[in-house]
Image: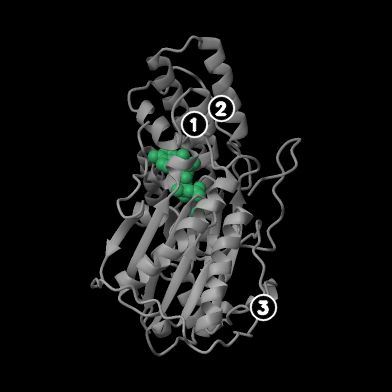
Amino acid sequence: MRRHKPIAHFLGLRQRQRTASRSDAVRFHLHEVPSIATRLRPNAPEALAQPRELEQIVSDRETTILGIETSCDETAAAVVARSPKGQGTIRADIVYSQLDLHAAYGGVVPEIAARSHVSVLDRLVKKALVEADIELSALDGIAATAGPGLVGGLMVGLMTGKALALVTGKPLYAINHLEGHALTARLTDGLNFPYLLLLVSGGHTQIVLVRGVGDYRRWGTTIDDALGEAFDKTAKLLDLPYPGGPAVERAATSGDPGRFPLPVPLKGTAEPNFSFSGLKTAVRQAAEAAAPLSDQDVSDLCAAFQRAVCRSLADRMQIALRRFRSQYPECTQPALVIAGGVAANTALRTTLDACASGAGFRLVAPPIALCTDNAAMIAWAAAERLAIGLPADSLDIAPRARWPLDENAAVALGHGKRGAKV
Ligand code: KG4
Ligand code: ZN
């Protein structure tokens, strides 16, 4: 099977960026007097009131954060610095993809994921510190993803973050993974608030209004499957390899998107939500009717699926872009940011680019390595929180398998279902 994300050479670790000088010795100093960070960040939304005013409280020196990410099937550690003017520098960014461990099962197996995080995370952290050429004692904080995600993996990363915070006396930042995605465009492109975010990954499909650090409004979400999940399930039913997204995209390049008519989910509905489970069922029915499937049939089905997805995204995004325009008429250079693994899809990018420019928006697409799961975004989110004076977290904070970015957003219910998974 072709690998989407190649496993790296160093102990299976993939290095994405080399900006710092190397050192043979691993400096891992854990000898400072422990002190427990006691400032608590309540998760209640009122605790984050008025972040736009808070944004004025910019720290007057560079801050450097170690980030840890273990919410799904990537183990990652990174060191990121933020200048007083808000410029970010990635000093180390290391990701170990577990893709090969899960491929045989056609999806992520939580127990395998958690065990793999345990076995590689400490080495990743050491390696990130060496690459960044920084000692633990010189950091301004330790950031770890606390949710949403697979709880076993979250526990591994958060416990590691807590242990490092405890022994170094550095503040702990328990970061919402979605906030990491939401703020990445400020690290890569120095974007100003407000902007629109479309997050499309294996676990999430959301349109988020990003108003400030800690200030998010979820405008749209999926009422059933996430988009990446729909790609993966479609690939599975067409007997294509895991992960399905790249396989479907590859097959679609030689397909006729007009041969199999498929529905465009939720087209014309008022709220910019998404639905993909009906589309997946339509693909299955078309595949069953055309069975046995030739390679060309598979390509045509993939092309039809991808076109229906693109049409749905264009239709849904237009609502959100219009809403943004009417809420922020003074915003002269509005931006639409895309993030998540599905943002690697070329057809989808082309569609969103046309959609954004047609509405007078700039499409901002961070490099793929920073669109998919990574720890640089977790470190950066903590640096952004620290810069506006938001408090660090207590060492007894618990991981949250479900943790919406916008706690006030209504639950999106699918037809006859228990509700959205995300
Ligand atoms: O953000 P990500 O790397 O991981 C998590 O969801 O945590 O996203 C992975 C998802 C998978 O569902 C994968 O099939 C999808 O992104 N994906 C793609 C493409 N590359 C990855 N979907 C469509 N087209 C692609 N080229
Ligand atoms: Zn993610």
Give the quadrant of the N terminus. top left
Q: What label sits on residue 227 in the rendered view?
A: none
Q: Is residue 286 above or below residue 159?
A: above
Q: Position of residue 211 (x, y in %)?
A: 53, 69
Distance Cα–Cα, label 2 vs label 1: 7 Å
The mark lying in front, picked from 2 and 3, is 3
Q: Position of residue 285 (x, y in %)?
A: 58, 18
Q: Are marks 2 and 1 in contact (CB under 8 Å)?
A: yes
Q: Are marks 2 and 3 in contact (CB under 8 Å)?
A: no
Q: Residues within 10 Å of mark 1 (few under 14, many from 20)?
A: many
The residue that disc 2 covers is 263
Which of the marked residues, 2 or 1, is nearer the chain's N terminus?
2
Which of the marked residues, 2 or 3, is nearer the chain's N terminus?
3
Q: Is residue 33 above or below residue 128?
A: below
| Residue type beneath disc 3 | Ala
The image quarter containing residue 208 is bottom right
Residue 321 visible somewhere in the drawing: no
Numbered disc 1: secondary structure: helix
Residue found at x 47% / y 82%: 387
| Residue type beneath disc 2 | Pro
Residue found at x 38% / y 64%: 333
Ligand 1 visible in quadrant: top left
The residue that disc 3 covers is 47
Numbered disc 3: secondary structure: helix
Viewed as shown, does residue 85 lie left or right of 417?
A: left
Q: Position of residue 300 (x, y in %)?
A: 41, 20
Q: Is residue 276 above or below residue 291?
A: below
Which of the marked residues, 1 or 3, is nearer the chain's N terminus?
3
